[in-house]
Amino acid sequence: MGSREPTRHLGPGQWLLVGAVVLYLGAILALPLVAIFAHALEAGVGPLLQTFDDPLARHGLWLSLVLALIALLANGAVGVGGALVLPRHRFLGRRLLDALVDLPLAVSPVMTGLAFLLVFGRGGWLEPALAAGDWKVTFAFPGLVLATLFVTFPFTLREVGYVLEELGTEEEEAAATLGASSWQTFWRVTLPNIRYGLGYGVILTTARALGEFGAVLVLGGAISGRTQTATTFIYNALEERQEPAAYGVALVLALASILLLAALEWLKRQRRKEI
Amino acid sequence: MSIRVTNLTKKFNGFTAVDGVSLGVDSGELVAFLGPSGSGKSTILRIIAGLEAADAGEVWLEGERTDHLHARARGVGFVFQHYALFRHMTVAENIGFGLAVQGAARPRRRRRVQELLELMGLQGFGGRYPAQLSGGQRQRVALARALAPEPKVLLLDEPFGAVDAKVREELRHWLRRLHDEVQVTSIFVTHDQEEAFSVADRVMVINRGRLEQAGSPAEILDNPGTEFVARFIGEANVFEARVHDGQARIGALAVAVAGFAEDTPVAIVVRHYDLKFWCEDDGGCATVVRMTRLGDRVKVEAAIDGAGPIFSQFPRRSSLLHGIEPGCRIHIEVTLARTYPRSTGGVSDPARSANS
C-alpha cells in the first residue's frame, strides 16, 4: 500500500459529531476514572497507604490477583485449544458448542452465581458427591475459581479464533510438508502467529477476572479474609462507610486497568508494525 | 524420484473433485497439470503431498506406497500459490525450517541456507522478513524453503498466480533453469497454457477431475486427444455438424471429414492459424463482422452464411488481410480441422478462447 491519505479537514457538522463523541466518552469513561483518583488522593497519600496495613484489604487484592492468574492460565490454554478445534473440525454438536462459548457474555454474573449455587450449594445436585469427599465449593475458594473461570471463558477463545480464521492453514500445511510434527508446528508456527490474539485474550481475561463482582459475591459470599475479593471488599467497605479503604483498593484496581489498557495498546502497535 | 498415482478419487460434499485419475511422472521430469479452475488439478497435487486424503486410489513415490503416510513423512517439497511463508521468521529462518525440525546440525543448516540464498539470487536477503520482500522474491524464498531439505519431489500449486505478468515471465524462465540445474522431479499446477507449454517437459490436461491427455507440449498442440483438449488449448473455432458424404457442412462452409459414418454428430475444431480468409470480387461464404487489433496481430471475426461466427488472426501486415474490412465478403479455407464425435450428455464449454 502507498502512503496514507492525507487527513482531510473536518466540516462543521463533523466537528459537532466529534465533539459529541468526546463529550460522551468523557462523561462515561474518563470522568469516573478521574473521580476515583481525585477522591482517593484527596487526603494525600498517607491514609491511602494505611489501606494496605489492613490485612483484609491486602487479602482481597491478593485473592483477586490469584483468581485472575488462574483464569488467564486455564482459559488461555483452553481458549487456544478450543480455537484450534472448534472452527477447523466438523463434529456433531459443533454449532451448539460454538454458540455456548458466548454464553458467559450473555448471562448476568449474578445469575451465574445463582446457577452454580443450585448445582454445588446446599440441596444442589452435586451436594451428596461433594459431601462424601468433604469438598466445599460454595462460599469457598473453589467457588470463586469456578465463577471467575465461567465469566472469563470466551475472551481468549474468541480473540485467538479470529486470528486463526484470518490466518488460514497454509503455513501449518507448509510446516507439515517440511517435516514438522504437529507439536513442532504448534510451537514454531501456530503459536507465534496467534501471539497477539492470545495477548489480547489474556489481557481481557485478566481485566474481567479482576473486575468480576456479581458471581463471586453470590457464589463466594464475600466472607472477610476468606472469600472477599478486591471488588467485594470495596462493596463491603462502602456499606460500612469506610470510604478511604474503598477508595484505596479501587485505586489499585484502576491502576491495574490502566496498565492492562497500556499493554493492549502496546500489543496493537506491535502487531501493526508487523503487517 | 518417480511419482505414480492410480485411480485417485476425491469427493467434497458430494462434488467429485478428482474422478479416477491415474498418471505417472518419471524421475527428473518437470510436468505441468493444466486445466481450468475447479478442474481438480490442485486437489491431485495436494493428495500427492498428503495435504488431502483421497477417498480411493493409491499414491506411489519411487515405488513406495505413500498414501497412508502423513505429509511430513513423504519427503515432498510444496510451494503454495500465496507463498505461505512463516511471517514471523526471517528469510534465512524460513529456508532453514525444514532442516531445523528434522534435527539437522546448525552448521549444516547454515551452509544449506547460504547455498540456497545464492541459488535463488537472494544473497543479502537472509535477515529480512517476508513482509519486506516483493511477490517474486517471496515466491523464490518459498521455493528455497521447499528445496532446502532436499525433497524427493517438488510440487508447485499455481506458483506464479499471485505475481504480476512481467515477474511471472521471469519466474517461469527461472523455474525452468532451476529445474535443469537441480533435476528434482517436479509437478506444477497452472491454468495458463503459455506457462505450461513454455516450462514443462510434459503437460497433463485435466478437466472435471479427469486426466484428458498427457504428452509433450508439441503432441498436445498438434494432436489434441479429446474435444475438450482441442477446445481448451489455443484459440479455436468449434462447430457442431453432422457428417454427410464425407463432409461436414457449417452453413456455406464445407469441411472434409474422414473416418466417420454417415450422419454422425461431430464437433469440428479449427485453430485460428489453420484458417485462411481472403477477399475476392466474386461471392465468398461469409461476411466480416468486426476487426480488432491485438498488438501486432489483427483478429477478424466473420459470420458464415447460414451458420454462426468464425474468427481468425493475422499478422498486421499480412497480405491475407488485403482488402478485408468490416462488412466485406470473404472466402474461407480450412487448412486443418480436427473432428471429434459429439459426446452425448453435453460437453462443457470451458474456454472457447482461453487465451484471449
Image: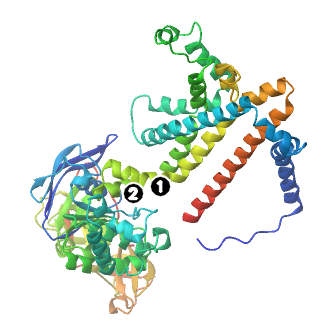
Which residue in the structure is indicated by mark 1?
Answer: A193
Residue type, label 1: Asn
**Residue in front for this viewpoint, A28 or B143:** A28
Can see residue B353? Answer: no
Determine which quarter of the picture holds residue A159.
top right
Which quarter of the figure is the C terminus of chain A placed in?
bottom right
Residue situated in front as seen by the camera: A202 or A61: A61
The quarter of the image holding the N terminus of chain A is: bottom right
SS type, badge 2: helix
Residue contact at pointers 1 and 2, CB within 8 angstroms: yes
In this rendering, the answer to whether B283 lies above or below A153 is below
Q: Earlier in the sequence, mark 1 or mark 2?
A: 2
Q: Tell me the residue at 33%/76% (across/down).
A: B285
On screen, B25 above or below B120? above
Instruction: Report the mark closest to the observer, 1 or 2.
Output: 1
Q: Nearer the viewer, residue B33 or A131?
A: A131
Q: Position of residue A43 (x, y in %)?
A: 90, 42
Tell me how far mark 1 sits from mark 2, CA to CA.
Answer: 10 Å
The picture places residue A246, in percent across and down from the top left corner, at: 81, 33
Quadrant of res B264? bottom left
Q: In this view, does B236 lie to the left or right of A238?
A: left
* A11 left or right of B175 in image: right
Give, as a three-letter code, the residue at label 2: Glu
Specify few, some or many for label 1: CA neighbours under 10 Å numbering under 14, 14-19, or 20 or more: many
Image side of residue B141 versus residue A257, left or right: left
Q: Where is residue B224 in the image (x, y as percent from the top left)?
A: 19, 68
Could you tell me which secondary element the residue under label 1 belongs to? helix
Residue A171 numbered mark, or none: 2
